[in-house]
Image (cartoon, rainbow, N blue to C red):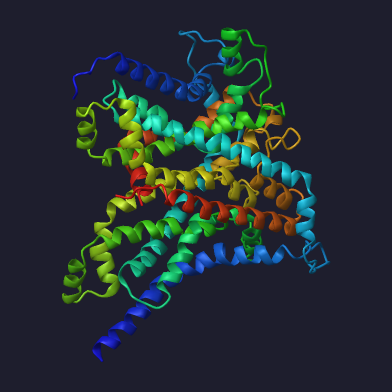
Amino acid sequence: MKRGFALKRDWIHGWLLLLPAMVFLFAFTHIPAVTTFLNSFFSTPRGRRPAKFIGLSNYERMLDDPVFWKVLWNNVWFAFGTIPASVGLAIVMALWVNDRLAGRSFVRMAYFTPTVLPLIAVANIWLFFYTPGFGLVDQITGALFGWPASNYLGNPDTALNAIIVVTVWKEAGFFMIFYLAALQAIPVTLKEAAQIEGAGRWTVFWRITFPLLMPTTLFVCVNAVINSFRLVDHIFILTDGGPDNASALLLFYIYEVAFRFWETAYGATLTVALLVLLSLLAIGQFFFFDRKVHYK
Amino acid sequence: MTGTGFSLDRILNTFAAWSLALLWVLPLAYAVWTAFHPAAYEARFELLAPLTLDNFAKAWDAAPFARYFLNTFLLVSLILAGQFFLGTLAAFAFARFQFPGRNLLFTLVLLQLLVMPDILMVENYQTIRLLNLVDTIPAIALPYIASGFGIFLLRQTFMTIPKELDEAARIEGASVLGVLWRVYIPLAKPTYLAYGLVSVSHHWNNFLWPLIVTNSVDTRPVTVGLSIFSAIDSGVEWSVINAATLMTSGPLLIAFLLFQRQFVQSFMRAGIK
């Protein structure tokens, strides 16, 4: 009977310890996620007119909304532009920094510093960097190749790519850290054994290092995918989504719809789309990588 | 140790690593250059150009940055205190107690790693409005106080602590919270440090949610203040904007340069799962 009593007491202690955190989690994550879904079936309340049930109208509107498709497409392009580049650079950076390189600590600091800066500050720095004619980008391309001044952020063809460059710059050093940790966990003997067998650096990397880094790559990729839907701060400064939504991403559009046009119900509908997309990607990635990851 | 220490391969790698590093610091270096020189040298690079702190003084006078810094400081402290408190209790429950619903609740906690409060800004704004907290510092902090990431991280750490220590303390008559306070928290100090650094730098830099819930000088954190200050149509000189930019990132940047090793290790520790 003593044991049963102890178990019950365990229950109560566990629940009580959890209670405060769960209240906040439910209030700001789980309940809003559910109400977002519910509100997407209602109209936006305005003044005295309360919200009324309108079925799938918001979803029909979304499917007919050219801006929605535009920002969705932009987001896909943004993900493909940022994820492979930043993850690839992160691996290369980590390999270099892990090596016995001259001036290693400076190099590591240079790679990692953008991570500590606020994305807003990063955007300011790059806005200046990109300034037509006068910014360093134009000065360098002008001096080296004789290119004329160009407005990278004001041109619909280049605005999103210019933002991708900024994002890669900001993220690569962050991901590098995880690879650095993983590299340090790989036993040196493994590499030495391969080298004694006559394997070159290239073979060692693809046959030993890279497969052993797979769990890290999974972790980094999940993060990178989430980030590609979450990082929008710099867009506010660099282009404000323009020109003509050329550089707007899904979350930025949700902000515009909900807090500039105050169409909260449509904003909720777009949020549902984002949540569905994120969940599908998370599940998909898990299954895709699960077959390729070699856990130790 | 294969004796190829000075091979061509090695030199090429060093060269490439350095080139990338220089490329990586270039944007920041350019901002530093303009911030510390008079406006006339914004695009002219002369080694002996006169140095000045005028740009910082101008920026400091042009916008209430002192207030913004105070707001950010309060915000970051509030979030960190809340996250430590709630996270510690929840992590302890998950690590050491058996109770019905544990796995389900843990899954719900992990769900927050995917569905972050930022994404739910439309609904969270309604909640904050219902609570009558719009344009207050607690409003910025509330959605982040319970962090799935923090709970997970602390739980992992608590689970590595030997149960024998726990039981020994209980035999000596310590209560549940006493054990937590005297055994678990002291042994998890490195995790708290790591998580604290990550949390502080994350919320110092956060922008979108504070932009939505604040609309006055008394509540705006530095990121929002900076974005208003540097809005394109404000006609402020570039050198002054760059000074303001460096100023707002300054405390974190300096802390990073001083405690580089701890920072890097903290981010590593926080990322290994």
Apparent side of residue A34 relative to residue B88 in the rendered image (left or right): right
Q: Residue at x 30, y 70 (%)?
A: B96
Q: To which quarter of the image does residue A196 belong?
A: top left
Q: Residue at x 40, y 72 (%)?
A: B102
Furthest-right residue in this view: A49
| Residue situated in front as seen by the camera: A207 or B61 | A207
Tally of numbered discs: 0
Q: Is residue B106 above or below residue A143?
A: below
Residue B16 visible from this viewpoint: yes
Q: To which quarter of the image does residue A159 belong?
A: top right
Q: To which quarter of the image does residue A134 belong?
A: top right
Q: Residue at x 61, y 10 (%)?
A: A142
Q: Is residue B123 above or below residue B20?
A: below
In the rendering, at what x and y percent does residue A230 appear? 57, 46
Furthest-front residue in this view: A197
Apparent side of residue B125 relative to residue A107 in the rendered image (left or right): right
Apparent side of residue B58 relative to residue A1 in the rendered image (left or right): right
In the rendering, at what x and y percent does residue B65 appear? 55, 38
In the rendering, at what x and y percent does residue B146 appear? 47, 61
Q: Residue at x 60, y 24 (%)?
A: A128
Q: Is residue A156 above or below residue A187?
A: above
| Residue situated in front as seen by the camera: B104 or A9 | B104
